[in-house]
């Protein structure tokens, strides 16, 4: 065979294109389904659901223990007594001695992070996201132990953090460990990790719906029955544990609020802009602070202690910044604080949080941001009332709306925090302003911080890019018949390989467009497939090309059907390492009706791109002239 012809034959996909010949048996003539037995998806979902139930109960217990642990350290550090009641650190009478207490906690956490696990640093959710997206949902067992202990120490010694972030990460770690103990896939382990995180959120705030949605928006990036059902089970049981151990009421006891809809809607529009700017500003300042700590010429072991020193000084002048601050959040939502104190709390809590969290200590981000943003909403309402007395805005209502909007925009989990704010009030009248303000804040944050959020920026700095948007897979929506090639390249089974090689080299229009050709018998029935790689191997064995194409190709095939979705067809290609599939009639698997190659799969993606970017002329065009 001349070299020029061999070059023309070998200049194409010689690897995966001949997967049928390498991976499947060459004996037999009947098309075969995808190789390998797979357990029914329904059975696996039931198994995951049972595991999720156990994770939900465990996460509820972990949340309760962490509350008690925080109470223990708070009582010891600020009141000198051995008790586990969840108390506020702001009522202490230590005077200047309050300053070194956070420093002691910072030193302990610094040693735990350096010699235990660096994964305990920060507020926990980015670490859970990293585990899902880049570590196949595997979290080290020691993280499940060290994270809640380090967070309890940091918060119990005055850290301006919430318990929810550590509980979410710890719950996720429990779910991951359960998935590692049992034989699970990486996707099932991801679901179990998300179940633990959702259960942790639900057990903290008694908000089961928000816990589920938060896990979907920040960890799963999918909405499927296989994940939604276990998530709901875990979240429900964790909430039941919370209700049994901590009471059935909401996290915050609120008085009746007047949300002022529709008369206050113009002011909510302005509040949405303010919240969006606050979300962006807080995110940028937090990571700027982290950058400054990284420039310090000392070991990172001491960074939490330095941040804690700043916290101690702020806490001496503004005791309300110390600890979780749920009582202060309740005061803000119930409009119990004057304008001056609202401003002080808003600024002092934000500064204390940025300094502490930027230093790399351990603690949750939600509660402190809730306090600062709630104070922002209260300040906004009080200021507007003083400027426009007729507005008669409710500071508590605006505080609640801002509380959900700022964190939703900062984290890009807007829907979760709309539901969260609704669940903690259980007042349906809050829904409209929450939706309006939250989406305006989110849209502004997307414009000013494209492609990143307070959750993903840390990962982006490590070179880990996260795409938080998700949509239905176009391959799940289109069938094979919509993109298959109906001009099937068929060859008679008795054709010689040498003749086929000549046709390929001569750029025969029937075979030159395809990497593989379908082989049929005298009655036109499918008996095999041959690829250009098969032709090259056959010529290596027999340079004369006397072997027929049926002998050179594969006779036991992986096929697809016209009504099969492209996702399933492309999965067959990937699992069997092949680049094309004969499309056969489902009633008669020997009758070829089409041919699906990689271009057919990519055609679906191309159609989606066209739907996204190609503008179509509208009917209004008739009323104007295009210039």
Image (cartoon, rainbow, N blue to C red):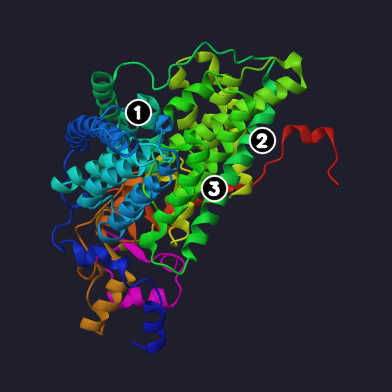
Element under disc 3: helix
Q: Position of residue 469 (x, y in %)?
A: 48, 44
Q: Which residues are magenta?
A: 492-521
Say which residue label 2 marks. Answer: 273
Whether residue 345 is situated above or below residue 8 in the rendered picture:
above
Figure quadrant of residue 300: bottom left
Instruction: Pick whichever, 247 or 572, lies toward us.
Output: 247
Q: Residue at x 36, y 46 (%)?
A: 567
Q: Position of residue 267 (x, y in %)?
A: 69, 24
Is residue 303 at all visible to an observer of this figure? yes
Q: Is residue 257 magenta?
A: no
Neighbour tally class for label 1: few under 14, some 14-19, many 20 plus, Cα within 10 Å = many
Q: Nearer the viewer, mark 2 or mark 1?
A: 1
- Residue 33 appears left or right of 384: left
Q: Position of residue 566 (x, y in %)?
A: 38, 46
- Mark pair 3, 2: CA separation: 16 Å
Instruction: Pick whichever, 456 or 481, lies toward us.
Output: 456
Of the two numbered discs 1 and 3 on the same chain, state the one appearing first in sequence.
1
Element under disc 2: helix
Q: Position of residue 124 (x, y in %)?
A: 36, 46
Q: Residue at x 30, y 36 (%)?
A: 70
Of the two numbered discs 2 and 1 on the same chain, state the one appearing first in sequence.
1
Say which residue label 3 marks. Answer: 283
């Amino acid at each position: 065979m001349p070299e020029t012809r061999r070059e023309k034959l070998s200049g194409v996909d010689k690897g995966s294109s001949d997967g049928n010949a390498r991976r499947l048996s060459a004996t037999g003539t009947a098309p075969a389904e995808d190789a390998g037995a797979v357990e029914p998806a329904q059975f696996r979902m039931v198994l995951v659901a049972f595991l999720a139930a156990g994770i939900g109960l465990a996460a509820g217990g972990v949340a309760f223990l962490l509350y008690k642990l925080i109470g223990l350290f708070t009582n010891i550090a600020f009141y000198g007594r051995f008790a586990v009641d969840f108390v506020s650190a702001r009522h202490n009478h230590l005077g200047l001695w309050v300053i070194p207490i956070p420093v002691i906690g910072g030193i302990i956490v610094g040693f735990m992070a350096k010699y235990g696990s660096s994964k305990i640093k920060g507020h926990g959710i980015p670490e859970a996201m990293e585990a899902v997206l880049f570590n196949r949902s595997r979290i080290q067992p020691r993280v499940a132990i060290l994270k809640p202990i380090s967070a309890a120490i940091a918060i119990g010694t005055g850290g301006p953090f919430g318990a929810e972030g550590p509980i979410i990460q710890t719950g996720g770690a429990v779910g991951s460990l359960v998935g590692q103990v049992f034989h699970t896939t990486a996707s099932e382990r991801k679901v179990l990790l998300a179940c633990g995180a959702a259960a942790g959120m639900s057990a903290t705030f008694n908000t089961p719906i928000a816990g589920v949605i938060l896990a979907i928006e920040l960890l799963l990036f999918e909405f499927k029955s296989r994940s939604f059902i276990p998530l709901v089970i875990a979240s429900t049981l964790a909430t039941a544990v919370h209700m049994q151990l901590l009471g059935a009421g909401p996290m915050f006891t609120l008085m009746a609020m007047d949300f002022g809809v529709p008369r206050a809607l113009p002011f909510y529009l302005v509040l949405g802009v303010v919240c969006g700017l606050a979300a962006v500003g807080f995110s940028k300042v937090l990571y700027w602070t982290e950058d400054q700590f990284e420039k310090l010429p000392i070991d990172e072991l001491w960074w939490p202690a330095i941040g804690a020193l700043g916290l101690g000084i702020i806490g001496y002048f503004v005791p309300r910044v110390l600890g979780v601050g749920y009582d202060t959040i309740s005061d803000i939502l119930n409009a119990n604080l004057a304008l001056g104190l609202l401003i002080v709390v808003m600024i002092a809590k934000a500064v204390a949080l940025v300094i502490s969290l930027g230093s790399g200590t351990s603690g949750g981000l939600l509660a402190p941001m809730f306090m600062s943003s709630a104070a922002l909403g209260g300040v906004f309402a009080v200021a507007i009332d003083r400027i426009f007395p007729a507005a008669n805005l409710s500071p508590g209502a605006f505080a609640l709306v801002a509380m959900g909007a700022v964190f939703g925009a900062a984290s890009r989990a807007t829907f979760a925090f709309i539901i969260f704010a609704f669940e903690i009030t259980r007042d349906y009248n809050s829904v409209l302003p929450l939706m309006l303000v939250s989406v305006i804040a989110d849209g502004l944050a997307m414009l000013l911080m494209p492609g990143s959020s307070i959750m993903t920026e840390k990962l982006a700095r490590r070179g880990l890019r996260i795409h938080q948007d998700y949509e239905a897979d176009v391959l799940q929506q289109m069938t094979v018949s919509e993109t298959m090639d109906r001009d099937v390249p068929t060859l008679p089974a008795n054709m010689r390989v040498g003749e086929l090689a000549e046709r390929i080299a001569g750029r025969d229009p029937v075979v030159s467009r395809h990497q593989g050709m379908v082989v049929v018998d005298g009655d036109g029935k499918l008996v095999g497939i041959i690829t250009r790689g098969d032709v090259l191997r056959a010529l290596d064995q027999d340079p004369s090309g006397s072997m027929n194409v049926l002998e050179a190709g594969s006779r036991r095939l992986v096929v697809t059907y016209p009504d099969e979705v492209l996702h399933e067809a492309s999965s067959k290609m990937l699992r069997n390492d092949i680049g094309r599939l004969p499309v056969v009639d489902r009633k008669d698997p020997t009758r070829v009706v089409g041919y699906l190659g990689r271009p057919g799969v990519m055609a679906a993606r191309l159609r989606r791109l066209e739907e996204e970017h190609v503008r179509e002329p509208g009917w209004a065009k008739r009323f104007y002239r295009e210039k």
